[in-house]
Image (spheres, helix red, strand yellow):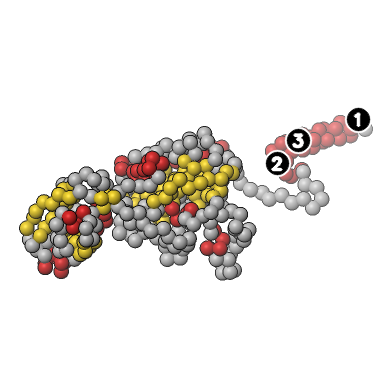
């Protein structure tokens, strides 16, 4: 009998020990009760889990630095109906209905100044700004510049987290960038890409075009948001995309901070942007025009019209003259002459080099102030 109890106790002891070992190593084997079902998965050991690369850490830091300065903008919030829920394509909810009145902006001064696109706030009677920390505040338009599609707002709240302005002139193709904004009205979103091209113009978007092209995803609602470098500094204001569908297709455009800062300073100081104007209608030189006027293709622009009584008319410029340089800077196309003339100071004499009847001659004229574009009706571009 003693031998039996000794054997029994040994078996129980071994069984209990095995149970404790199994419970510690595979608790899922002993915790099943009733209809409970467990899914066996294979988890990577800690040493195999992904470790952020140097570039990932850099982009993460840039996003964390810039994000608090990017806001969502809602125009005419009291007049908008509740937005329909996100749904599958083809259910009848149009993109315009879903995202109308939603855009983005960037806080560029602790005093509450915000840069955004003119088309985001154009025609707005009231503007509400949603800050990164969840606060909401009303904003007013300080001034707009349709020629660059930029606008300056100011909020009722001061001491805001302003972004640091970077040097857009130092960007190079291939540099990594982040686009931050409120795409489709879903809330602040960060996308990454590179600088795809610089100095994009002749796109028919604005009067003055000098865009940064990027493949960082930009969608409806991103307009007015921030394009930042790997240091989290603002290098552009997201403005437009190339698309055949209305959605992102890998080509986005941002207005560089060099332009945005000039517009910001001019609007805050003067209430509007001051640019030079000479009163001519320039056109690019085609091979046929180059042959007729004894000029070189891609060298200069031909004047096809002159405003009577304007600065160019008073300086004896004529239709058929080819402008090849402004203040010594070579001119190759219409966009370059528009930008060069706009940069002139009204009332201060400037030198132009023109080709007339095959002969080069200098012309000095005094530019006037560029007339402001006529106000557009709400909904127009």
Q: Of all residues shown, which one is farthest toward the front? A: 309
Q: How many marks?
A: 3
Counting residues from the start of the chain, the first of labels 2 and 3 encountered is 3
User: Closer to the camera, 17 or 243?
Assistant: 243
User: Closer to the camera, 119 or 198?
Assistant: 119
* Residue behind mark 2: 26
User: Closer to the camera, 56 or 126?
Assistant: 126
Q: Is residue 127 left or right of residue 216?
A: right
* Residue behind mark 3: 20
With respect to residue 105, does 375 lie above or below? Answer: below
Q: Secondary structure at mark 2?
A: loop
Position of the C terminus, as image quadrant, is bottom left
Residue 117 shows up from this direction: yes
Q: Secondary structure at mark 3?
A: helix
Q: Contact, CB < 8 Å: mark 1 with mark 2?
A: no
Q: Contact, CB < 8 Å: mark 1 with mark 3?
A: no
> Which of labels 1 and 2 is toward the front?
2
With respect to residue 243, does 190 lie above or below? Answer: above
Q: Residues within 10 Å of mark 3 (few under 14, many from 20)?
A: some
Counting residues from the start of the chain, the first of labels 1 and 2 encountered is 1
Q: Secondary structure at mark 1?
A: helix
For the residues marked 2 and 3, what is the alpha-carbon distance in whole angstroms? 10 Å
Residue sitting at 74 percent across and 44 percent down? 29
Quadrant of res 303: bottom left
Q: Residues within 10 Å of mark 2 (few under 14, many from 20)?
A: few
Label drawn at residue 2 = 1
Counting residues from the start of the chain, the first of labels 1 and 3 encountered is 1
């Amino acid at each position: 009998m003693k031998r039996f109890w000794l054997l029994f106790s040994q078996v129980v002891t071994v069984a209990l020990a095995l149970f404790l070992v199994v419970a510690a190593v595979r608790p899922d084997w002993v915790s099943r009760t009733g209809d409970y079902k467990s899914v066996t998965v294979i988890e990577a050991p800690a040493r195999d889990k992904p470790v952020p690369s140097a570039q990932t850490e850099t982009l993460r830091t840039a996003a964390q630095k810039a994000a608090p300065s990017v806001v969502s903008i809602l125009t005419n919030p009291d007049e908008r109906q509740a937005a329909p829920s996100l749904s599958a394509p083809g259910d009848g909810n149009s993109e315009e209905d879903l995202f109308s009145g939603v855009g983005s902006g960037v806080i560029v001064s602790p005093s509450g100044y915000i840069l955004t696109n003119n088309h985001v706030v154009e025609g707005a009677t009231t503007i509400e700004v949603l800050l990164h920390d969840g606060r909401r505040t009303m904003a007013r338009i300080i001034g707009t510049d349709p020629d660059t599609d930029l606008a300056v707002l100011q909020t009722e709240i001061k001491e805001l987290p302003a972004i640091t302005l970077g040097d857009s002139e130092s960007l190079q193709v291939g540099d990594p960038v982040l686009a931050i904004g409120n795409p489709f009205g879903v809330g602040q979103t960060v996308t990454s890409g590179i600088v795809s091209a610089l100095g994009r113009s002749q796109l028919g978007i604005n009067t003055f075009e000098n865009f940064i092209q990027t493949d960082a995803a930009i969608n409806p609602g991103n307009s007015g948001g921030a394009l930042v470098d790997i240091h989290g500094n603002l290098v552009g204001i997201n403005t437009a995309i190339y698309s055949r569908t209305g959605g992102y297709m890998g080509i986005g455009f941002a207005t560089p901070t060099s332009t945005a800062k000039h517009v910001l300073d001019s609007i805050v100081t003067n209430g509007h942007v001051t640019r030079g104007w000479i009163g001519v209608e320039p056109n690019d030189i085609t091979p046929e025009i180059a042959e007729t006027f004894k000029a070189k293709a891609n060298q200069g622009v031909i004047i096809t019209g002159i405003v009577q009584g304007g600065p160019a008319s008073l300086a004896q410029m004529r239709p058929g003259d080819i402008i090849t340089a402004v203040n010594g800077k070579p001119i190759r196309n219409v966009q370059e002459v528009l930008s060069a003339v706009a940069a002139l100071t009204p009332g201060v004499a400037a030198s132009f080099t023109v080709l007339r009847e095959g002969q080069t001659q200098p012309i000095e004229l005094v530019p006037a102030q560029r007339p402001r574009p006529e106000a557009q009706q709400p909904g127009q571009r």
